Image (spheres, rainbow, N blue to C red):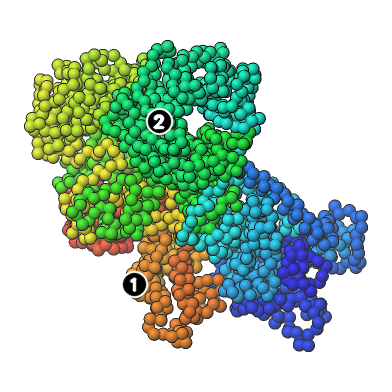
Amino acid sequence: TTSHSEAALYDSNTTSHSEAALYDSNTTSHSEASNPEPTPPLPPPPAPATPHPQALLDAAGGLDQREEPPSSATPPPVLDVLADMGFPTSHIQIALDRCGLPARASQQVQMEALVSWIIDHPNLLGMLEEVLDPSEGQLEVEEDEVEEEVESAQNQTGVESSLITELLETEELGTVTNMSTKHAPDLLDGPSSDSRGFVASIAADLDSLQQSSMLSAFEQLQKGFIPADPLEFPSTDPLGESLCRTRRVSGGDSCVGSRKEGTPGGFSSTQPLCTGMVAQAQGLRSPEECAVALHRVTSALRTVVSRRVVVFVLCASSTYPPEKFLANLGMLKFDSPSFLVGLLRLVHASRIDGTPGIHFGVKLRTSLLPVLGVDCLCAAIKAVSSLEPAAAASDPQATTAGMRSSGGHGFIQTCCLDLVAAAVGGADVLILGGWRGKSLVKVNVVDDVSVLSCPNFSVSQSLVQGMIDAMVTAGPGSVEVVCLANALATCIMSSKLQCEHKLWALKQMLRLLDGVEKKEDVCKEGAITPSSLEHLIGHKGQIIACVQNDKAQRLISIAEDNAVVLWNMAAESRQPEMTMLPLPSDVFGERKAYLLPVLSQNPLQVCVAVALNQNLCVLRAKDGQMTSIRLPDLITALEWKRGQTEGDSPILLVGLVSGQLLLAAVLRISMNLTPEIQTTYLEPTLKGAVCSVSWSPSGHHFMVASTSALQVYSQPSALGSTYTLICSEDCEVAKVDWSPVDAIVASLERNSCIMQIWDMRQGHLESVYRSSNFHITQIAWHPTVSTDGTMLLGGGSRGGTIYLWTVDCVRDMTNQRPGGKAAGVHFVATLNGHSAPITSLIFSASGALFASGCQAGSVRVWDMMTNQLIKLVTHTVGEVLNLCWTDYGLAICYKNTNNLCLLPPGPQDYLGERSVFYAHPTLSRYGVSQLDKAPCLAALLKHSLLILADQYCYELAEIASGCQVTHSEYLQSLTALVMGLDLHHAVLLPLHPIHLPPAPVPADWQWLDTLNLAIAMARSLAKRLPFPSSDRLPLIRGLYPDDPHQPTDNSTWTLKMDAEIVEWAAERPLDWWQVEAGVVIHTWGRGTAHQLGHSAAECVLPDHAGQWEEDMRLIVAGNLCTYGVKFDGSVWSVGEGLCGRLGHGNTIGETNMRLIGALQGIPVVHVVAGPRISAAIDEGFALALTHTGEVYSWGRGFGGHLGHSTSEDVCTPKRIEALVGKEIKMIAACDRHCAALTTSGHLYLFGLSDHGQLGRGHILTNQLDNKPAVQVTQFLDTDERTQLGDVRIGYVCCGQSYTIAISESGSEVFGCGSSECGSFGSPLMSSDHHRPYLLSHLALFGLYVKGAAGRHVTALVTVTGQVCWFGKLCEGMAVQEPEFLRLPGEEKVVDVQIACDYMLLLTGSGNLYSLGKNAPGTCLLGYEATALQSTPKVIERLSGKSIKQISAGPSHAAASNVPCPPIQREAVTFLVPLSVPMQYSSLKDIPCRAIHARFRVLNQFSRLMLSSWRMFTTSVCGTTSLHINPLAEASTRLLISPTNSQSMFEAVINKTMSAKTHGPTIVVNRAAQESHSRPVFPQIASQIVQKPPSDLRCSSRAWKVTLVGEAADDAGGVFDETIALMCEELQSNTLDLLVPTPNARNKCGFNMDRYVFNPGCTSPKMLRYLKFLGIMLGVAIRTKKPLALYLAQPIWKLLAGMTLTTEDLEEMDLMFIRTMFSIQGVHTTGVKEEEFSELIPIEFFEAEDMNGHFVPIVPGGGHNRLTFHNRQEYVEKAIHFRLHELDQQVAAVREGMSSIVPVPLLSLYTARMLEVTVCGSEQVDLQVLKKVARYRDGISESDEIIRWLWLTLDSFTNEDKVLFLRFVSGRSRLPARVREIAQRFKIMKGGETTDALPTAQTCFFQIRLPVYRSQQVMAERLRYAIRNCRSIDMDNYMLRRTVGEWEDDEEL
């Protein structure tokens, strides 16, 4: 007989199981027998005894023995054999009872019948045994459900039995010929013969298709690749919920082939369609049909049995150690790759059940059989792969494709072929997702032949995963790594695959590169693969030269055939567009041509000159029109004049062999007429032939090199004018080349190969450098000159070496001529690579690339930033004659060839080439050094940055719109790959030659630069290593040289120190503002709208605004209103509410400061208000700048100054979408227009433009400019820009009808708008300026740092503290020309404010001055003044108050002692603290200045992480060798500002808040809880988990509770009460979700009073409960109602997305850690190997879980013995098991949380932060209650009963305080922050009865206190009430009684 491995593949006509398991040739896919769709069974009860896997193997090997010779030994009874195989006795007995076996049946027949019946009835077996003998640990199943399922299973069994019985009772068997099969297609239709040949033919055809498709794909990739569109988000996800949904597979596993959720080890499948089969059996018409049907059914049954036996044996064997597993595979002949792949395909196609252990009825322990179905096959593939050596591909085509051959049976070959076929053909080639029962293309897979022959993408995924695991030990350089990486790269770039498959391929690529062993020493040789050339065919003679015409997008070439060819480079074919035929032979006269043609293009690219011996031809570039003239002698040199402008006639300097020079002017070149050449000969004729000519950059001079001298001439201003010989030098020069500046020239001597550099500034040629030892043959100047006058010169030598020199000279910016000092030449670099003399050199137009060609035909392209080779061409045709850069590549002219060659890509597309260069060292460490063997991988490297940029731009827009909260897993994976392979260096290290300063990172890549810096700093801080030395890290270095605690020296700062610094800044911000006495605010002016903070309607002198002084960082005076910004970034407002200026969503005024709810959770750094001139009551608006650079506006919208493209009023802060992503750093406003300034110095202006104040160059008279913000990128006209260059704006201020902008340097001031009344400081300027105008006259007064503008007046503050002002401040006070304001004592001004008719000046000493006049009826100067105050006068009332901040409004003004935030929102605004608080003990001995400097470093790191956190929210970017996730470590989160992270979290919550008052209504029966039947938690959980998550996102109540049998109406109190009840149930014996920590069980260590998740909660029901627990946590965060949960600190770490450490395990299970360390170090105590087993009580690889149960820690751990030698492995596995023991439970909880709150943002939270956010403070702080207490019914804070109440509460223990809080509010805890308490604690009178019990209304957080005789009586009654009165049955009565009493209650 054949083996079981053959049985699993083929269905032959033998009687064994062996050939039945894979191929079933006689049935179709609809057949019930051949394709039994298995039903996911109920989990079986545990078996009384687990069979040994070896017994299973032995029994499986002897299943089929009918052809074996009879054995002399008596065969064992059938029951014993089945029991040894692992079948429970109960199952065997049930099968015997129901099979009805014949009494005389042989033992083999009995065994097969019993096995078949057990396999086919798993559900019935499990349920019958569960009903007869229910065991512990099973899921609760209701009796009625059990009965229904048993009945269904019995019905199914009856149907199947009737079918088989009916077939078996057929009398005659025969062959059906020519019969119709339509009436029974499943039983009769299909091939009846062996189908192996048919299968082979199908497989061969498919392989051919794949090979041809792949080769075509490779050819396309080599030609070029266009990235596909970005992968779109599948749906809107504002909370990041999709990232936290329970994934079927975690980590690097595939997203396919996973187990069905809720079914242990089960696969998703459908019920078999038995009814149709029965009907077909009943319709059989003849004995022949019955015979055929019987044959097919029995064959199919044998196939099913064989398949299940094989898979079951594999599953059982996989629990053994690897070496034993391999031995079993070899013994059973299961080690064939083709066999395992075939099984895998059948499993994925649902042709084999994936849960063989359950279907066999073998109740194996879950720990014994942890891998089933696909997992066990992958384990077998991994094991076999580790033994199979990699063979080189014998097929050249396969080698090109990056494939590997292994005799046709290798796994790598299968993987790569299938992956590439899928990437090329997509769904038309592979059956994608077939395991799910659906496919992306409807392929009719009718039988197992098709399943086994058609590749399946799911199979490929499983193979790849197993192969990657096996390749970890393959070593670098293996063929497998290159092949698989190449195939995965093809999938990543494919446009045919779905997003999920591309993401899968990307994640596998990361796993592959991360798992392969790395090389330490990497050799860069062979880094550059020779590139292929594109040939342009069109010439008939040898090619000579070519030039690129960018205007016409043409390449112009000339050859020895004297033909000029124009190539259209934009065309795809690049065929010759036009060929200019050579001149007739008679034009040459008697002298035959013997000089090669010369080609030259003028700088403006208007025309091209061609020298054909004596003929000068000029070709017009745009249309190819040509004209020519004949000269008296041979032309030897020509060059076009430089420095000409558009419209000038091009001038050509021509030199002849006779020494004559002539100037040829080309006329009518810009017209459509034929060009005309006009010549002028220059006298006298030179001695010797002209060798070279060159024009100076300005065109004022030209140089001529002849065989006798080097001469410089002054170019005449017009034709016919005389010329002047400036200087001459006797030498033989072959070539001259003028530098980018006029005075420096380089030359090459004719025979000596000596290069000289000449300086002409002294009026003669002065040699400043002579290369005597370099043997230079070619020279080329870099086109760019640095700002300090440094140039770069390249020279190629005779030996093939290229040398680089820098030439230093200082330029005179006035006349563009060098001046100041003699040029200095410095040798700087050498470029090696050529082996022959250099024949051509050329820089690209930008200077980023440098190309060189040599006599041997080699061409190299160099990166001028790194001076490294990035492109190579090897050519043997001939030497390189000419090189020319085009937009499409480097054009190369070779000797001895007629073809023009093109080396793609163009200079602007070399990003991919640089990427490959930077990735090569890293790839070499992974064993990938030759990318020519992996073309797809090379294409991915070249285009990954383009793909990354497109994907990021798409996702950034989605995040900015609020549709997504974080980046996709695809972008995070792609970023990890780019950074892991160092591809990001290609864009983060901007290209600049060595003579130029580094350029800034491009704006499009700032995000990647920030991410890179964040990772670098995180790595340094985590390991306490020095920060990377990079100029792009703007750190504070050496701030205090004498201080031992340098801010950037990580070795002197511990993690505790850094964490305490961050905590100190967050908890005590006033310490960092040097405000010892607290915030003090003074206001004065009009107070009719309560905007002054005190009751006065008019305040002449500044007075305290005591109500606002708590934590108020910024105070802003608006029009009849005041805005305040607190230290936490919250915005408050008070005053007049018309037009919605207060931002509260209405037009109602406020008498007290009120929080602007729409901005809650969005940290604001600055607020500006308008108008500042008009004080009309119906005018008022404000703008707010957030810490992320976004701008919000609200209020009066007339004029369009709100930036929303509308003139309507906005009552709630609304984000200005036109400014999103612009990184705004400053905002300004006046009456009708506003300004926003970016960090890059760009200015955006929006609003009314009636006087040109927006600087747009147009007038909108009496119209509103309601367009979005428009950027004013340049503040200069065209002419001025040439003189001064681009300007970056550093400060902006808005006047009533004009705008003032100051440059970052402070040297330039610009204005646009109205210059009336001298507002621009010049009496000559009186009109409107609609373009920004440079106010150059202000430069005389110094450099400016800030300013202010009013109605017609401007004041500018200089760096020296002086104020330059001009214009009209008010009537009688005007200055037409700028002048300085003089202050008493010459005090330095630090701030200036202008509003209405007055000006405020703040000095550095804290004094405040004012000038101007008071408004009618309003005193704004701060003192009584009836007349005009023309000079600054100090406000005496504020003297000595240390004023550091001022604000001027049209109706009032304000001043504060808190420093005003600086303009730069990124800048650190904290000052040096005065002393260190006692609680920060680690900082007590460190100077405050050092702490402040260190905080600046930490604050910078925090900003970087807050900008990059969206790249660290999934497990794909975990800490690996390719990429690190800093946020996975708790130490990183400790250094992130908690204030900012909490604000970002709250902002997302506010944006997703439901407008409903409460969520869905649920019903709870508390009486059931009292009768101990069912707790409250399951009742609520079962109802809430079914509700849509969006309905639960309410601000106060996620759901409304109806209590059965109680008259309570839930207005909030019932909700709080049930939440508290559920918290109590969770931490009691009622539920099993939480269990005490092992330390509590062992009574040692920490957290003995804490709880952890129960690791045994793995059933669907318990996982749903855990999900609801997550919903509870999310609701607590969203509603700010804390939960009284006592979870261990490591659990909070897991919920926050952090990884656990052994220290965390020690906090939960001290004994476990001690045991592990004892086992690990047992040898140190003298224990020997023979004593180990006696001293260590653990026998196998098992360990205790959180519940105290011993479980295997590895697959098969119950059989793997612990020994002295493997103890280290045991400890590692045990600790790893415990670290990940709760992963499933934590994932369920986080999934529930993610539906309510943005869980991805928890990556910024520490464990303690999350615990405080969810649970609040454990201690009830009475001071917090006092702050939120409000007194009603005539009770005041001074009453005796109130004093008694607080004294009584103060005497309570914390437990009693919790009961009191529960009594009055229904909750057990208060939020940690006072501002999060939404309700105020109301205390009211309780009636006339003396000494009665108090009553409370939990819904409204209020208590009613009766009259008490004494405090002792009150305390007694209060204690009794809080401990005994739990009923809330009177809520309806109290609701009716107190209706209206809280309607006027306001939010805190």
**What's the mark number on residue 186?**
none
Tell which circle, 2 or 1, labels the residue nearer the N-terminal end.
2
Vertical side of 1590 occupied by 1304: above or below: above
Q: Report how many numbered discs are placed on residues in the image.
A: 2
Left or right: 778, with 617 as reference point: left
Q: Name the residue under label 2.
A: 731
At 74% across and 65% down in the image, what residue appears? 9
Q: Does dot 2 land on a helix, a strand or a loop? A: loop
At 53% across and 29% down in the image, what residue appears? 548
At 23% across and 27% down in the image, what residue appears? 1348
Q: Can residue 243 be seen in this view?
A: no
**Which quadrant holds residue 1360?**
top left
Q: Could you classify mark 1 by the number of other residues whose Cα lies within 10 Å: few (under 14), some (14-19), or many (20 or more)?
A: some
Q: Which amino acid does label 2 sit on?
A: Cys
**Which quadrant holds residue 1340?**
top left
Image location of residue 1740, percent across then percent down: 51, 78
In the picture, which quadrant includes the C terminus? top left
**What's the mark number on residue 1645?**
1
